Image (cartoon, rainbow, N blue to C red):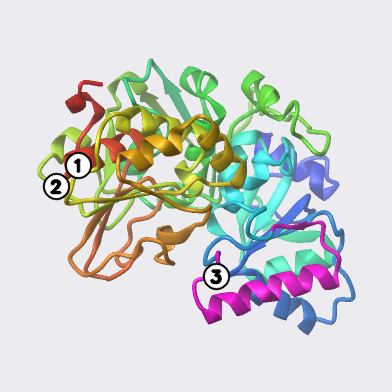
């Protein structure tokens, strides 16, 4: 079996499972946010459930329209707070104690290797970086799982991606996953478990792995997963709230397809409007001016991402024709960035620093685009109207390219700044 099939077998009480099989499996964690939890709460009450299956395994995180941007957002967030109080949930994270869900849960040690996790948010696939099976589901599935601790699954076929070779300067996890999506398309891994491996992955830091697994959904994937290794074990050692289980794939495991990438040939990569798969080398886009730069999101709002951007911005100014918005993904990241004086670098460069929020990534708030405006962002989607007006455009990149673009006023690279 593959690592994905091993996790499913363990959680369904079966000796073996195989691709295409329909199963019921126990879940280790159920999560929802301020957009998706209200629907789950309504359905939970509609089915007459008396209580949640485990008060410490249901996580509610207001992060999309929080801090509450208007009355409707405030009412939705209040639903999460009221339900959490009524059922004494141990994993409700209020503003000031919260962060973007897919950065917060790994940071807090609430997701661990070997877990089976569902969330009412498509980027729940992020946790595969820890060697867990995690996937996004609908709010009604979340409601049922909140009550029963179980969910039904069709075991996905696994697809193997092998990365080898030394990374070029400033190239990281974001470039690898954008390159991969550009190669296979937004439906290239449709309902597949994307297993990422190879020497490059084995040397990739956890923040880069989280970025790659985060965007599996942009390739149509059901999930992404990396077999746990020394980097995984070091990451969870002092933070795991539960005992991790380290699964791996059998040597004779079956894969629907295997793709290999020589990472020494992967350049700084940018995804152009209006699909994540519409990728080009950053060096081919120097004539594209930008109005806004966003550094943050569940894809690239971690401390290492901010360090990367600050390294580019240090001693420089945001181009007068550009606004730059920096959003640390969690309160802990915000505080550490403050201690390291990263926020000073951004503010001295004339960027603005926001409280943790998904904010502009989904066209929520804190940086909505007007008609005709163009942004480059470290976020994960660039569909029509994703960050605001349908007549706006979003380009996706890693933090270093986004920061260099903020200085240059157009899409550019750190190399142009002598870095």
> Label 1 to label 2, Cα distance in Å?
6 Å
Mark 1 in CB contact with mark 3 (< 8 angstroms): no
Task: Give the quarter of the figure containing the N terminus.
Answer: top right
Q: Which numbered dot is residue 288? A: 2
Which mark's residue is nearer the viewer, 1 or 3? Answer: 3
Q: To which quarter of the image does residue 332 belong?
A: top right
The residue lying at 30 percent from left, 39 percent from top is 349
Please provide percent x and percent y for residue 87: 85, 69
| 384 with respect to 134 (left or right) | left
- Badge 1 is on which residue? 411
Please provide percent x and percent y for residue 169: 31, 20
The residue lying at 28 percent from left, 31 percent from top is 268
Q: Residues within 10 Å of mark 1 (few under 14, many from 20)?
A: many
Task: Give the quarter of the figure containing the C terminus.
Answer: top left
Mark 1 in CB contact with mark 2 (< 8 angstroms): yes
Q: Is residue 86 visible?
A: yes
Q: Residues within 10 Å of mark 3 (few under 14, many from 20)?
A: some
Q: Is residue 255 magenta?
A: no
Point out the tag, 1 or 3, that comes first from the N-terminus.
Answer: 3
The residue lying at 30 percent from left, 27 percent from top is 266
Which mark's residue is nearer the viewer, 3 or 2? Answer: 3
> Label 1 to label 3, Cα distance in Å?
32 Å
The kind of secondary structure element at disc 3 is loop
The kind of secondary structure element at disc 1 is loop
- Badge 3 is on which residue? 68
Rendered view: 107 above or below 30: above
The kind of secondary structure element at disc 2 is loop
Q: Which residues are magenta?
A: 67-93
């Amino acid at each position: 079996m593959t690592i994905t099939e091993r996790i499913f077998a363990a959680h369904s009480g079966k000796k073996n499972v195989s691709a295409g099989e329909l199963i019921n499996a126990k879940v280790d964690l159920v999560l929802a946010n301020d957009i998706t939890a209200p629907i789950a709460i309504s359905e939970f009450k509609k089915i007459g459930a008396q209580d949640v299956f485990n008060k410490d395994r249901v996580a509610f995180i207001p992060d999309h329209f929080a801090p509450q941007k208007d009355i409707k957002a405030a009412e939705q967030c209040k639903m999460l707070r009221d339900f959490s109080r009524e059922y004494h949930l141990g994993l409700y994270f209020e503003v000031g104690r919260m962060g973007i869900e897919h950065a917060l849960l790994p940071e807090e040690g609430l997701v661990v290797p070997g877990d089976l996790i569902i969330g009412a948010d498509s980027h729940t696939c992020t946790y595969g970086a820890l060697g867990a099976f995690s996937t996004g589901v609908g709010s009604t599935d979340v409601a049922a799982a909140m009550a029963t601790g179980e969910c039904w699954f069709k075991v996905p076929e696994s697809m193997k991606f092998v990365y080898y070779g030394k990374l070029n300067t400033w190239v990281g996890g974001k470039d690898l996953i954008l390159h991969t999506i550009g190669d296979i398309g937004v439906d290239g891994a449709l309902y597949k478990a994307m297993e990422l491996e190879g020497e490059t992955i084995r040397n990739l830091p956890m923040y880069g792995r989280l970025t790659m697994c985060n965007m599996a959904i942009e390739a149509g994937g059901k999930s992404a997963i990396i077999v746990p290794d020394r980097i995984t074990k070091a990451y969870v050692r002092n933070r795991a709230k539960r005992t991790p289980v380290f699964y791996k794939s059998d040597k004779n495991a079956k894969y629907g397809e295997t793709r290999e990438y020589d990472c020494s040939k992967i350049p700084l990569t940018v995804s152009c409007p209006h699909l994540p798969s519409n990728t080009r080398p950053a060096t081919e886009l120097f004539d594209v001016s930008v109005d806004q730069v966003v550094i943050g999101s569940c894809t690239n709002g971690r401390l290492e991402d901010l360090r990367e951007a600050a390294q580019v911005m240090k001693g420089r100014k945001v181009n007068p024709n550009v606004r730059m918005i920096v959003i640390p993904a969690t309160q802990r990241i915000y505080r550490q960035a403050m201690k390291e004086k990263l926020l000073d670098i951004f503010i001295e460069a004339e960027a603005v620093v926001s409280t943790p929020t998904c904010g502009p990534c989904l066209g929520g708030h804190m940086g909505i685009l007007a008609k005709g405006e163009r942004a480059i962002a470290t976020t994960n989607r660039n569909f029509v109207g994703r960050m605001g007006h349908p007549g706006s455009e979003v380009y996706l990149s890693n933090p270093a390219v986004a920061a260099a673009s903020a200085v240059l006023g157009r899409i550019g690279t750190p190399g142009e700044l002598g870095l």
